[in-house]
Amino acid sequence: EVQLVESGGGLVQPGRSLKLSCAASGFTYSNYVMAWVRQAPTKGLEWVASISTGGGNTYYRDSVKGRFTISRDNAKNTLYLQIDSLRSEDTATYYCAKAKLGRYFDYWGQGVMVTVSS
Amino acid sequence: DVVLTQTPPTLSATIGQSVSISCRSSQSLLHSNGNTYLHWLLQRPGQSPQLLIYLVSRLESGVPNRFSGSGSGTDFTLKISGVEAEDLGVYYCVQGTHAPWTFGGGTKLELK
């Protein structure tokens, strides 16, 4: 059974940093593109970042470039999202998602909440 | 970025009723490789999204066959043939043809 379990969220002050993790199991993790998708309270879904199977290629939405860093450890079957210089508009539930064929999300984690507030 | 416009934003239905949701793209989702990477997700209240349909019309494993998808180019439709209580939630279309991935604004299905 595929499982994606996020952790690391919480209440953080503006300008501070946070690192999210996503532990994957139930599939050959190193074979799949992985992504982070977020959802602000009562809003829709927004792709944030994605990473190639080996980790050598990373992609970000414009609004997070330079502040977010996606990475992966294929030995630990874990995906990460380092978030720096947090802003109030980063407040959201962050989902880890597995990308099949690199083109669609077939499994999602349960999500982790990040709240940016002073 | 590709803009996906879903209509209606809210849909009220009775159990057993058939309903359709439209997803219109700002540009063609036909990839140069011949595939169309348009998919549908359902997010039930308090849950994470789940994949229902991928590549326009292919039913994800375990998804009931009352769900069906159709369309091409820029116009796509999700149909539920006989709504059941467990179908309530927000439906999203999502495209993976053009980077970056983008999502429709969602259609909330509620009971009438």
Image (tube, coloured by chain):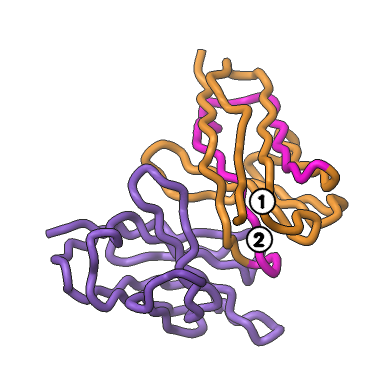
Chain colours: A orange, B purple
Mark 2 sits on what residue? A99
| Number of numbered discs | 2
User: Where is residue A78 shown, x and y percent of the image?
Assistant: 74, 42
Pointer 1: what residue?
Answer: A35
Tags 2 and 1 in contact by the CB under 8 Å rule? yes
Nearer to me, A2 or B13: A2
Q: How far across and how far down the image is residue B43, in percent?
A: 40, 54
Q: Chain of mark 2?
A: A
Q: Is residue B34 left or right of residue B106?
A: right
Residue A89 percent coordinates (x, y): 52, 32
Q: CA distance from mark 2 to mark 1?
A: 7 Å
* Of the image marks 2 and 1, the number of the one nearer the N terminus: 1
Say which element carries label 2: strand
A113 shown above or below B74: above
Q: Nearer the viewer, residue B69 or A63?
A: B69
In the shown orientation, is residue B73 left or right of residue A58? Answer: left
Crowdedness near tag 2: few (<14), some (14–19) or many (≥20) residues, C-alpha within 10 Å: many
The stretch of residues the image draws in magenta is: A76-103
Which residue is found at the position 51% from the left and 43% from the top?
Answer: A110
Residue visible at 32% across and 60% down in the picture: B107
Residue drawn 84% across and 50% down? A55
* Residue type highlighted by circle 1: Ala
Q: Residue A12 vs residue B83: left or right?
A: right
A62 versus A114 height, above or below: below
The amino acid type found where label 2 is placed reads Ala
Which mark is on residue B75? none
